[in-house]
């Protein structure tokens, strides 16, 4: 009889340990995105503090807007291949620029953006559109803006 009692106790312990392991596993994976879910977003969700946190239904996640262009010059002038970009206020703007000829940079005075563009290296310029309006992006190398190396960033509400 003592042997049967030990078997019952041992069985109960095994069941409890198994339930505990399953509970720990489920808790550790809660909120972790599957590969399919990760491909839906282009940037990670911000971690919000627990005290005074905004409910998830009210949380606004701003989009990441990706653009690509080249910087170059030819006999007609100096250019960015993309003359206009449109985003919404609060969006993260990510521009990948490849300088294919000459010395260039990318500048937006009002948003405090300036980035050198090394030759033949894709360079990522990333910033947040913090205000609405139309902003000129340009190359600040002497004479480049005057020869046509500029475009307009439209930031809407």
Image: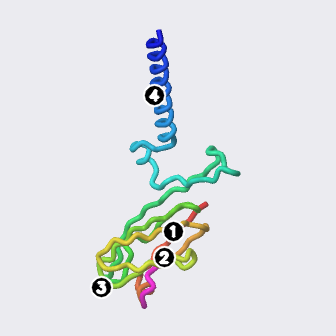
Q: Marks 1 and 2, how far apart in space?
A: 13 Å
In this picture, residue 47 sits left or right of residue 50: left
Of callouts 3 and 2, the N-terminal one:
3
Q: Is residue 138 magenta?
A: yes
Residue on which disc 4 sits: 18
Q: Residues within 10 Å of mark 1 (few under 14, many from 20)?
A: some
Is the residue 119 above or below the residue 130 in the image?
below
- Residue at 48% over, 24% down: 13
Q: Which residue is mark 3?
A: 75
Q: Reading the chain from its start, which is encountered first: label 4 or label 1?
A: 4
**Which of the two discs, 3 and 1, sits closer to the camera?**
1
| Image side of residue 118 versus residue 24, left or right | left
Within 10 Å of disc 3 (Cα), the crowding (few <14, some 14-19, many 20+) is few
**Range covered by the magenta-colored residues:** 137-142
Residue at screen point 56% across, 71% down: 134
Residue 127 at x, y percent in the picture: 51, 68
Between circles 2 and 4, the one closer to the viewer is 4
């Amino acid at each position: 009889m003592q042997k049967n009692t030990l078997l019952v106790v041992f069985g109960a312990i095994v069941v409890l340990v198994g339930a505990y392991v399953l509970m720990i596993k489920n808790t550790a994976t809660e909120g972790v995105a599957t590969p399919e879910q990760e491909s839906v977003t282009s940037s990670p969700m911000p971690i919000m503090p627990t005290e005074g946190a905004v409910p998830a239904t009210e949380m606004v996640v701003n989009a990441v807007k990706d653009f690509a262009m080249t910087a170059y010059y030819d006999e007609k002038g100096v250019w960015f291949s993309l003359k206009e970009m449109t985003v919404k206020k609060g969006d993260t703007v990510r521009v990948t620029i490849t300088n294919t000829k000459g010395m260039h940079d990318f500048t937006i005075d009002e948003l405090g953006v300036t980035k050198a563009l090394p030759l033949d290296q894709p360079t990522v310029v990333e910033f947040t559109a913090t205000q609405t309006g139309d902003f000129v992006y340009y190359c600040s190398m002497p004479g480049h803006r005057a020869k046509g190396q500029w475009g307009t960033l439209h930031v809407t509400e």
